[in-house]
Image (cartoon, grey):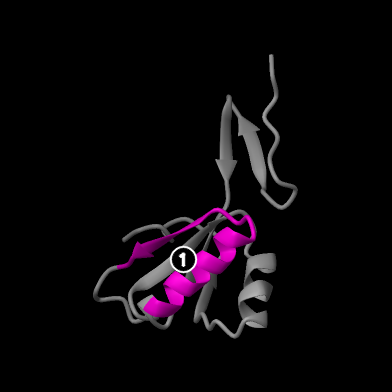
Amino acid sequence: MKSTAFPADLRNTQQSGVILLTISILDMPSYTYAVKAQRLLRSRGYPCRIRRREKSSDRGCGYSVHITGSSESPARLLESYNIPYSVISGGGEGDDQL
């Protein structure tokens, strides 16, 4: 049986044949910054996507970047390119509710 390799910073747990992956969420101040962040992170090999949050959310502009794995390295990368983000969520329960 062939094993699947995961990046070193990707936390995974095997329970009953299920692999649980951490999704980190960065709330962005504008859609433009969300797109810039996504392009930069993808160019550096970080799988990510832009998601729309509830319109009633008081965090950011309503757009966030969801990153598969730990957010420490991607956050440092965004800071080095002066791309602001307002909230880091480490993938806790309920963070993906849109």
**Quadrant into which the C terminus falls:** bottom left
Q: Where 45 sits versus 1, above or below? A: below
Q: Which residue is mark 1?
A: 65
Please report the residue visible at 65 percent of the width from the left and 38 percent of the height from the top. Answer: 13
Residue nearest the observer in this picture, 83 or 66: 83
Q: Is residue 14 above or below residue 91?
A: above
Q: Quadrant of the N terminus?
A: top right
Q: Residue furthest right?
A: 8
Q: Which residues are magenta?
A: 32-53
Q: Position of residue 42 (x, y in %)?
A: 56, 59
Q: Is residue 92 left or right of residue 12?
A: left
Q: Can you say whether 4 is above or below 62 in the image?
A: above
Q: Is residue 25 magenta?
A: no
Instruction: Give the class, few, some or many, for how many residues have Cα within 10 Å of label 1's Cα (few <14, many ≥20).
Output: many
User: Total label count?
Assistant: 1
Q: Is residue 53 left or right of residue 43?
A: left
Give 51 or 97, whichever is nearer the viewer.
51
The amino acid type found where label 1 is placed reads Val
Q: Residue furthest top?
A: 1
Residue 61 spot, x, y in % from top left: 34, 80
On screen, 20 above or below 96? above
Query: Can residue 13 be seen in this snapshot?
Result: yes
Q: At 48% across and 73% down in the image, what residue appears?
A: 36
Q: Is residue 22 left or right of residue 54?
A: right
Q: Residue 57: x, y in percent?
A: 31, 76
Say whether residue 27 is visible: no
- SS of the residue under disc 1: strand
Where is residue 20? Give x, y as percent: 57, 41
Q: Residue placed at 68% from the left, 40% from the top?
A: 6
